[in-house]
Image (spheres, helix red, strand yellow):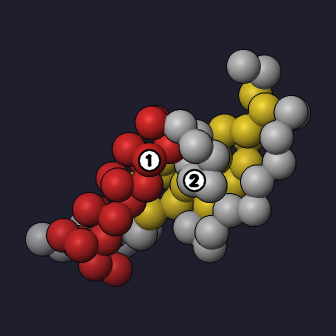
Amino acid sequence: MKFEKGIKMLIVSTYPPRECGIATFSNDIVNAVKTVFGNTLPIEVCALQNNEYHFQYGDEVEYILRSFF
């Protein structure tokens, strides 16, 4: 499958190393999309982070959105 030039996927969610079921699920989605589409569909992650914790994210996390939850 070929995608339009410039198209990419953005996942806005909690993300590992945060220990949370949604973070794990989001990471699983990233891995599955990479397995199926390889480099033809770039993926960026915007990790949701509250002010209480500060994590060291992997390279796939391009953005961090501070949230109040």
Q: Residue furthest left?
A: 1
Q: Is residue 8 visible?
A: no
Asked whether the beta carbons under mark 2 and mark 1 sit within 8 Å of each other, the answer is yes
Q: Amino acid at mark 1?
A: Thr
Q: Is residue 47 visible?
A: yes
The foreground one among 69 and 43 is 69
Q: Is residue 62 left or right of residue 44?
A: right
Disc 2 from disc 1: Cα separation: 6 Å
x then y, percent, for residue 31? 34, 65
Image quadrant occupied by the C terminus: top right
Q: Residue furthest bottom?
A: 39
Q: Is residue 4 left or right of residue 17?
A: left
Residue 38: which numbered mark, if any?
none
Residue 36's image quarter? bottom left
Residue 68's image quarter? top right
Image quadrant occupied by the N terminus: bottom left
Residue 16: which numbered mark, if any?
2
Residue in the picture at 62% in, 55% down: 17
Q: Earlier in the sequence, mark 2 or mark 1?
A: 2
Q: Residues within 10 Å of mark 1 (few under 14, many from 20)?
A: some
Q: Residues within 10 Å of mark 2 (few under 14, many from 20)?
A: many
The foreground one among 43 and 21 is 21
Disc 1 is placed on an element classified as helix
Q: Is residue 39 left or right of residue 44?
A: left
Q: Which residue is mark 1?
A: 24
x then y, percent, for residue 21? 45, 36
x then y, percent, for residue 47? 64, 46
Q: Amino acid at mark 2?
A: Pro
Q: Is residue 2 left or right of residue 16?
A: left
Residue in the picture at 86% in, 33% down: 52
Disc 2 is placed on an element classified as loop
Q: Residue furthest top?
A: 69
